[in-house]
Image (tube, rainbow, N blue to C red):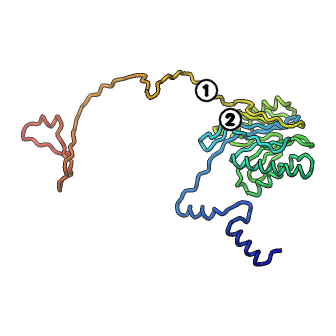
């Protein structure tokens, strides 16, 4: 039991540290003060990803590209965007790389505790609920858009989870900056009775469409096939954008420049003027104009006007 004076003391320390809630907003006043003084706020960095998930007749197939970007900069060409939650549940992440990595790690630990407490396999809907609760608690400040799939005793399931905490349970999904191109391929080629090879090929085509129509997606394609027997993570299943080969041979010596061609231009001088700068005297501009060749040919006694 807390006495009144101890409760007031605890509240005062919590207010001072700004730790009254799970998300810390202690820098909001600082940011508002900097904006009032004329400082420009930091610009948001655009991220790029193409992630896809489908349900086929025997399970779930997830796919993702491997390019990580920081605005116009490609920071990583072979990053992993398919995260492990349980042996039968995997998740693809789009958005901020740190947010997707941390939310999947924390959710995976929570699912492990749930499995140990209940002594049974974790349902896929339970993983979806944990992710949605965490994202909704932070009101979209966690930039993680997820495509989660798994197979449990109720069958294959696929969830599309948004950063605000909402979700969709659909047979095929695509998220990231390459969503439009990937979804067009899925809507054209998906069927409920796809076998495993047809499903993998459809996911490859959807990710390839996102790679070739979006600068934020690229490099390789990772796949994850989830069935009742378990999951198979296919790292670098396909190389979507191969590096081009150098056609020419450049054998230039160090500290030298190869001259490919020399051209001489003939220039004709039509007029020449020389300006001399002398010490400035009071009442003068300090610049004296020297006559050109035409002025030198003037007869004696004639005068020239300074420009």
Rendered position, 6 above or below 46: below
Residue that extends furthest to the bottom in the rendered view of this protein: 4
* Element carrying mark 2: helix
Residue 211: numbered disc:
2
Residue 101 vs residue 281, the one in the foreground: 101
> 39 left or right of 117?
left
Select label 1 or label 2 by which is in front.
Answer: 1
> 266 left or right of 257?
left
Q: Quadrant of the C terminus?
A: top left
How much space separates mark 1 and mark 2, taking CA atoms? 16 Å
Residue indicated by mark 1: 244
Residue 274 vs residue 302, the one in the foreground: 274
Q: Quadrant of the N terminus?
A: bottom right
x and y percent of residue 160 in the render? 79, 45
> 15 left or right of 304?
right
Residue at horizontal 86 percent and vertical 51 percent from the top: 113
Residue at horizontal 71 percent and vertical 68 percent from the top: 14
Residue at horizontal 69 percent and vertical 41 percent from the top: 49
């Amino acid at each position: 039991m807390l006495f009144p004076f101890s409760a007031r003391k605890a509240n005062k320390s919590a207010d001072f540290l700004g730790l009254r809630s799970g998300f810390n907003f202690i820098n909001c006043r600082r940011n508002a003060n900097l904006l009032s003084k004329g400082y420009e706020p930091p610009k948001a960095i655009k991220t790029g990803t193409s992630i896809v998930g489908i349900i086929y007749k025997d399970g779930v197939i997830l796919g993702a590209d491997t390019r990580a970007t920081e605005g116009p900069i490609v920071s990583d060409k072979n990053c992993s965007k398919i995260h492990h939650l349980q042996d039968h549940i995997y998740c693809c992440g789009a958005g901020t790389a740190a947010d997707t990595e941390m939310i999947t790690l924390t959710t995976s630990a929570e699912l492990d505790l749930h499995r140990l407490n209940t002594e049974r396999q974790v349902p896929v809907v339970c993983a979806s609920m944990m992710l949605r609760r965490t994202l909704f608690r932070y009101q979209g400040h966690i930039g993680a858009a997820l495509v989660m799939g798994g197979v449990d005793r109720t069958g294959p399931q696929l969830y599309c989870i948004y950063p605000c905490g909402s979700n969709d349970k659909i047979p095929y999904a695509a998220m990231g900056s390459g969503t439009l191109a990937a979804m067009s391929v899925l809507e054209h080629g998906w069927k409920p009775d796809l076998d495993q090879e047809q499903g993998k090929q459809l996911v490859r085509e959807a990710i390839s469409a996102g790679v070739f129509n979006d600068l934020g997606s690229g490099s390789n394609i990772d796949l994850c096939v989830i069935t009742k027997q378990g999951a198979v993570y296919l790292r670098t299943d396909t190389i979507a954008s191969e590096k081009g080969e150098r056609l020419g041979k450049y054998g230039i010596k160090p500290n030298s420049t190869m001259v490919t061609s020399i051209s001489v231009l003939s220039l004709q001088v039509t007029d020449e003027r020389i300006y001399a700068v002398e010490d400035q005297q009071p009442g003068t501009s300090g610049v004296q104009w020297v006559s050109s060749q035409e002025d030198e040919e003037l007869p004696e006694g004639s005068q020239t006007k300074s420009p």
